[in-house]
Amino acid sequence: MASLCHRPACAGAFGQTAVKRAPGVQRGRVQICASYKNKENIDLSKVAAFAQHGSDVGGTAVQIARLSARVQQLTLHMQNNRKDHSSKRGLQAVLSQRKSLMQYLYKTDRSTYDKIVVELGIRSVIAGDSHKAAQRAAVEAAQ
């Protein structure tokens, strides 16, 4: 039986064989922190204090410290460029990512969470902590 289509018969479902594509590379969550242009304007001096060992670059505490440094850099940029809405959106994304990591760290390792809250000066992300009770308790525990 002759085909009504001018194309030759193929093995694929829609007339052509399936094209093999390279497997997609999944982007890590820290890529928000690594994909910006002004990497030289960020102060990462406090990050090393939160590493568990010499080659720790992806631990939760290290990621929070890196994101906090990025938040400081973006906050300074937003003070000088109020109408830069794309940077504002980027700042909100970094803050959201840091909040998620802080909530995870609060559930898994409370002592490291308290250390980060005190040393980086981050507000507590605990729901219902309107009077900063967790931050005060962390400061008292550190003394």
Image: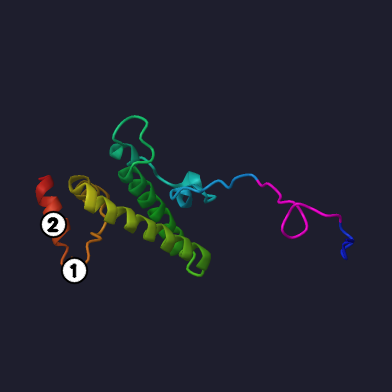
Q: Does residue 79 belong to the magenta stretch?
A: no
Q: Would you identify the image quadrant in which residue 102 lies?
A: bottom left
Which amino acid lies under the numbered mark 2 shown in the image of this protein?
Answer: Arg
Which amino acid lies under the numbered mark 1 shown in the image of this protein?
Answer: Ser
Question: SS for tag 1?
Answer: loop
Q: Does residue 17 belong to the magenta stretch?
A: yes
Residue 119 is situated, as x and y percent measured from the top left of the image, at: 24, 47
Vertical arrangement, residue 18 with respect to residue 2, above or below: above
Question: SS for tag 2?
Answer: helix
Q: Which residue is mark 1?
A: 130
Residue 112 is situated, as x and y percent measured from the top left of the image, at: 22, 45
Near-viewer residue (83 or 111)? 111
Quadrant location of the C terminus in the rendered image: top left
Numbered mark located on residue 136 in the image = 2
Label 1, label 2: how far apart the Cα atoms are: 12 Å
Residue 42 is situated, as x and y percent measured from the top left of the image, at: 43, 47
Q: Is residue 84 visible?
A: no
Vertical arrangement, residue 23 with respect to residue 55, above or below: below
Q: Residue at x 74, y 60 (%)?
A: 14
Q: Residue at x 33, y 49 (%)?
A: 64
Q: Which residues are magenta?
A: 8-21
